Amino acid sequence: MNSILPTSDGGFLLVGVSTSGATGDKTQPARGGLDYWVVKVDANGTKLWDKTFGGPLPDVLLNAAPTPMAGIYSRAIQHPQLGTIKPRRA
């Protein structure tokens, strides 16, 4: 994980990257290339949910911030198959 972000409900968002499929604590398959992965845990560290973002090529998470309702704002670059780079809203 690259970042640990506190949330308004006392929990945390763990933000990082992954190339693996749905194994262990990761519940969603790899999207392809490098994906970014967000995990929500409560104040005791119990996992509540996780989400994988990305496309068939490497995706780069630029930054992330928690929302007031325990969600996440993120800014990332998605590398589409055509070889150009465009911003993607998650």
Image (cartoon, rainbow, N blue to C red):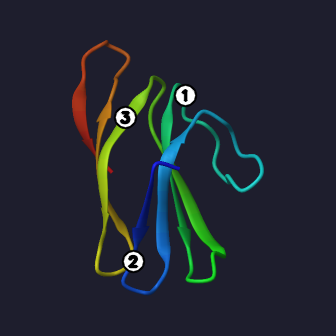
Amino acid on which disc 2 is placed: Thr
Of helix, strand and loop, which one carries label 3?
Answer: strand
Which of disc 2 and disc 1 is earlier in sequence? Answer: 2
Of helix, strand and loop, which one carries label 1?
Answer: loop
Residue 68 image position (x, y, % from top left): 29, 80
User: Does residue 38 sit above or below 61 in this rendering?
Assistant: below
Horizontally, residue 15 falls left or right of residue 24, namely left
Q: Nearer the viewer, mark 1 or mark 3?
A: 3
Residue 60 image position (x, y, % from top left): 37, 34
Tell me which residue sits at (49%, 79%) in the image: 11
Amino acid on which disc 3 is placed: Val
Q: Which mark is residue 59?
A: none
Which of disc 3 and disc 2 is earlier in sequence? Answer: 2
Q: Which mark is residue 32?
A: 1
- The residues bearing labels 1 and 3 have C-alpha atoms spaced at a distance of 12 Å
Q: Nearer the viewer, mark 1 or mark 2?
A: 2
Front-most of residues 60 and 52 = 60
Of helix, strand and loop, which one carries label 2?
Answer: loop
Amino acid on which disc 1 is placed: Gly
Horizontally, residue 77 falls left or right of residue 2, namely left
Q: Which residue is mark 2?
A: 7
Which of disc 3 and disc 1 is earlier in sequence? Answer: 1
Tell me which residue sits at (60%, 33%) in the image: 19
- The residues bearing labels 1 and 2 have C-alpha atoms spaced at a distance of 29 Å
Residue 34 image position (x, y, % from top left): 50, 30
Proximity of marks 2 and 3: CB atoms separated by less than 8 Å: no
Q: Which mark is residue 60?
A: 3
